[in-house]
Amino acid sequence: MRSLRPWPLTLATAVSLGLLIYIATTSLPYLVSSPTTDPNFGALNHCLSRALPEARLGWAVSPDASRAAVFSPHAVAVCGPGEHTSLRKLAGTLAIAFDGDNHLWLSAGGRLLRDDGTTLRPMGDFAPVALAGTARGMLALDASGHLVAVDSSGTVLAQTLLPGNAGRLFVGSKGLLAAVLLEGRLGVYDTHTLAPRELDIPCPVESLWWLDAPDQLLIGCTPPGAPSYVLDARTGTRREVPARRLAPARRLPGRPLYVQGCDGFPCTAPPP
């Protein structure tokens, strides 16, 4: 009987130790990768999570990473710089982005809007499905492939019709060049004039990343395992690089920083 007495204590200790190990192995990785512990966007994400706790459909980060925004089916929240926070009740938001002056633009209710701090200023009866900030203002792409460049006041700088349905917009460092990805077809344009850059693209493109050099981007081809290439939009040349499977990420125009989505928030991404 004496030899059996320590058994309940040993069992309890083992259960406690197992529970501690379980919590450490399951919670710690989450805390390390949590949007609110991100080294660059943790404070902004903590602010955004409190301002808009419901499900988030999209996010945007200002070029200098001082502001961030998220939107849901019913509202748009903006945090930064510092302790500044705003929440607007707004239904039907399709896309959001910051311009080169850190103003937030929105596509909602069939209109293009700009947040002036106190009001949402209409910038045109245009319903883009994709927005991207530039050095001069904003690029807007609608579902029919109509691409428009506007300056910070809403004046149309240029427009063109792209061959395809709605695509994705990516603006490079300094906000001078934009890439448009439409069903595997890649086009690169000047963000002011929308003049196309002639590039020899050897494959259908699955993904792309702008690099630190303003004229260079990395593309990933289809099918999986196909080569990747670095394209130079200034010279029109390309060079093959080892194929890499990388998560989608965007480079901020104003800082050498890559951003990707995590749980509806912006998070720091490794450079490609």
Image: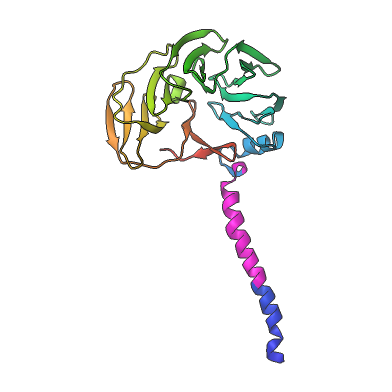
Residue closer to the observer: 4 or 54: 54
Which residue is depicted at the point 72% across and 86% down?
5
Across the whole image, how many numbered discs are drawn on residues? 0
Please tell me which residue is depicted at 63% across the width and 24% down the height of the picture: 93
Q: Residue 169 in magenta?
A: no
Magenta range: 15-36
Task: Tell me the colour scheme of the image.
Answer: rainbow
Residue occupying the point 71% across, 80% down: 8
Residue 270 is left or right of residue 242, and the answer is right
Instruction: Pick whichever, 102 or 226, lies toward us.
Output: 226
Residue 118 left/right relative to 127: right
Q: Is 29 colored magenta in this rendering?
A: yes
- Residue 193 point in image, percent of width and height: 42, 11
Within the image, what quadrant is residue 106 found in?
A: top right
Residue 126 falls in image quadrant: top right
Residue at the outermost bottom position: 1
- Majority SS type along the magenta span: helix
- 31 to 98, vertically: above or below: below
Question: Residue 56: where, in percent of width, then height?
Answer: 63, 34
Instruction: Judge from the rendering whether residue 209 lies leftward or rightward of residue 123; answer left or right.
Output: left
Residue 211 lies, in percent from the top left, at 40, 31
Q: Quadrant of the N terminus?
A: bottom right
Split into 4 quadrants, where in the image is the C terminus?
top left
Residue 100 is left or right of residue 80, and the answer is left
Looking at the image, is 126 positioned above or below residue 86? above
Locate residue 181, reporting x and y percent.
42, 26
